[in-house]
Image: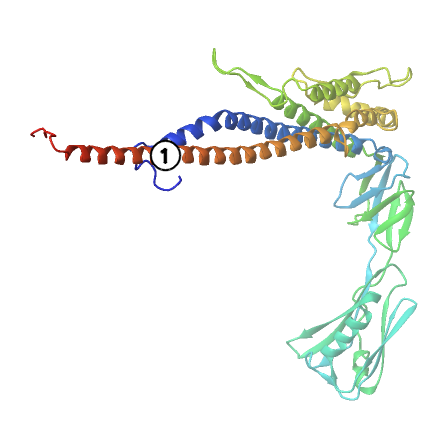
């Protein structure tokens, strides 16, 4: 508002100017609001479509992996006795494994010393700890305590697989140093020697070994074998199994086969991604009539040719049997038990899929993977739309430019409206001033005329 208005004429100039400005901007405001809503909705909708399409391509590319069909899976009939894993070089087969003895490591104790962990060795010396064919020296400084000896062993020999602890007998006030190894297998026993008068008590009157190092003993299909560790590799090519519990006369079945679980999981991810794509496109292209005569609610991409072309291409590949060869057991996804439902989504017949994988695992891989495989063809169908600089990115970029242009038009409208408002205020204020002047002139003339001689004043 340009100051105080309407004084001269008594006219409500503010209301007149505001109404005139509102009438001037209303059509353009409405047009730009509609364009903004339409543009932003399309940008969001195309972004959602691109995201679902990219997720689908990722799932397809994940299945288009020959190594997925080259892996092997090893399973145990009793994981409390035996666990196993297999490399892709492993051959399929079934084995009977009997665990007779687990591999163990050595553990020894020193002689008993009178005192607790703070017992000190006045003159010090050297401890020599053997582990199989190796030996290691630990220097003991004069005045070092039993606790400090333990800590020195743990610090210096930890990486060698040797650790120490102190066991104290509160009844008779004695303590012993206990040495443990993590190296299993026969011949890997611990030994303890000492030099220095005060340290001799550690090696005098030592008890028998608390635990001897020994090999694991087991049978595979009746063949007796041994291993220095409980993790056995090399006994069956490409298979590593871990012995967990020994029990003579009890066999565990070890099965090596194709990794059908991994393939089924990847196929499920693919189906889920496709179904999500269908759900997304259905929402974006929906048409819903509200009431008998109400305005219909339509998706932002209803009738969109891009969406239509993508879905038609994917459906064509899913039902296409031309790519299969005469001798192939699988020529369409339906042959694996994955079929299209009435709502356009995919469903898995687990029984049929399991049978296909168990009976023709390699053939499933040939059908799905490779340059001419189904997953590669599906990925190629969408690549031109989702890649950087692809169709969808270009469309979104174009809409973003349109949105920027709308913002510029809104700014221009504000400038134009401000100019119109200023012009109207100027015009109405000029009129108001003129009316004020004329009124004052009229009043002055009336007063002068009324004072002229001979003028008869009307009695009130």
Name which quarter of the figure residue 400 lies in. Answer: top right
Residue 163, picture quadrant: bottom right
Give the answer, above or below, for where 41 lies relative to 254. above
Q: Residue furthest top?
A: 292
Q: Is residue 9 something one can see in this rendering?
A: no
Residue 147 placement, left or right of 376: left
What residue is drawn where x is 72% and y is 20%?
311
Q: Nearer the viewer, residue 158 or 121?
A: 158
| Number of disc labels | 1
Which residue is found at the position 74% from the left and 45% from the top? 80
Q: Which is more toward the observer, 337 or 22?
A: 22
Query: Circle 1 is placed at which residue position?
Result: 14
Badge 1: residue crowd in 10 Å (few <14, some 14–19, many ≥20): some
Relative horizontal placement of residue 221, taking residue 45 as reference (left or right): right
Q: Nearer the viewer, residue 61 or 308?
A: 308
Residue 365 in view in this figure: yes
**Vertical relation: 435 (above or below) 198:** above
Q: Is residue 431 above or below residue 353?
A: below
State whether residue 35 is above or below residue 414: above
Place of residue 310 in the rendered image (x, y in percent of width and height, measured from the top left): 74, 22
Give the residue at the far front of this rendering. 453
Q: Quadrant of the C terminus?
A: top left
Q: Residue 347 versus residue 292: which sits nearer the camera? A: 292
What is the image's colouring? rainbow
Give the structural element (helix, strand or loop) at label 1: helix
Name the spot of residue 25 as percent of width and height, x first: 48, 28
Q: Is residue 418 left or right of residue 312?
A: left
Q: Considering the image in quadrants, where does the N terminus appear?
A: top left
Give the percent coordinates (x, y) of residue 342: 66, 15
């Amino acid at each position: 508002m340009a100051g105080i208005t309407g004084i001269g004429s008594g006219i409500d100039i503010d209301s007149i100017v505001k109404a005139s400005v509102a009438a001037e901007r209303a059509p353009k405001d409405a047009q730009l609001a509609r364009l903004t809503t339409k543009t932003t909705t399309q940008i969001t909708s195309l972004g959602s479509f691109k995201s679902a399409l990219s997720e689908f391509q990722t799932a397809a590319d994940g299945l288009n992996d020959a190594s997925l069909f080259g892996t092997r899976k090893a399973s145990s009939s009793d994981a409390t006795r035996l666990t196993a894993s297999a490399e892709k070089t492993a051959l399929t087969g079934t084995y009977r494994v009997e665990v007779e003895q687990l591999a163990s490591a050595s553990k020894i104790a020193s002689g008993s010393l009178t005192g607790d962990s703070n017992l000190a060795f006045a003159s010090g010396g050297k401890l020599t700890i053997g582990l199989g064919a190796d030996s290691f020296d630990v220097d003991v400084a004069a005045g070092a305590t039993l606790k400090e000896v333990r800590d020195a062993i743990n610090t210096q020999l930890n990486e060698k697989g040797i650790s120490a602890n102190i066991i104290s007998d509160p009844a008779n006030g004695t303590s012993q140093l206990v040495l443990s190894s993590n190296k299993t297998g026969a011949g890997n026993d611990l030994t303890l020697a000492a030099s220095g008068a005060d340290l001799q008590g550690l090696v005098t009157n030592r008890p028998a070994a608390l635990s001897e190092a020994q090999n694991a003993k087991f049978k595979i299909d009746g063949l007796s074998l041994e291993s220095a560790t409980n993790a056995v590799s090399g006994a069956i090519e490409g298979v590593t199994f871990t012995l967990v519990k020994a029990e003579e006369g009890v066999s565990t079945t070890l099965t090596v086969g194709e990794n059908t679980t991994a393939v089924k999981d990847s196929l499920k991810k693919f189906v889920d991604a496709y179904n999500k794509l269908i759900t997304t496109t259905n929402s974006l292209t929906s048409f819903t009539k509200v009431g008998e005569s109400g305005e219909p609610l339509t998706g932002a991409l209803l009738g969109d040719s891009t969406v239509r072309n993508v879905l038609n291409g994917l459906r064509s590949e899913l039902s296409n049997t031309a790519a299969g060869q005469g001798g192939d057991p699988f020529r369409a996804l339906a042959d694996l038990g994955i079929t299209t439902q009435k709502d356009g989504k995919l469903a898995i017949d687990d029984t049929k899929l399991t049978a296909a994988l168990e009976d023709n695992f390699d053939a499933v891989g040939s059908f799905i993977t490779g340059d001419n495989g189904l997953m590669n063809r599906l990925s190629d169908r969408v690549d031109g739309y989702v890649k950087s600089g692809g169709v969808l990115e270009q469309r979104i970029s174009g809409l973003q430019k349109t949105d920027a242009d709308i913002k510029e038009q809104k700014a221009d409208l504000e400038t134009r409206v401000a100019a119109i408002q200023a012009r109207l205020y100027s015009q109405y204020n000029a009129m108001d001033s003129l009316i004020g002047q004329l009124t004052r002139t009229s009043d002055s003339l009336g007063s002068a005329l009324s004072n002229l001689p001979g003028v008869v004043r009307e009695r009130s």
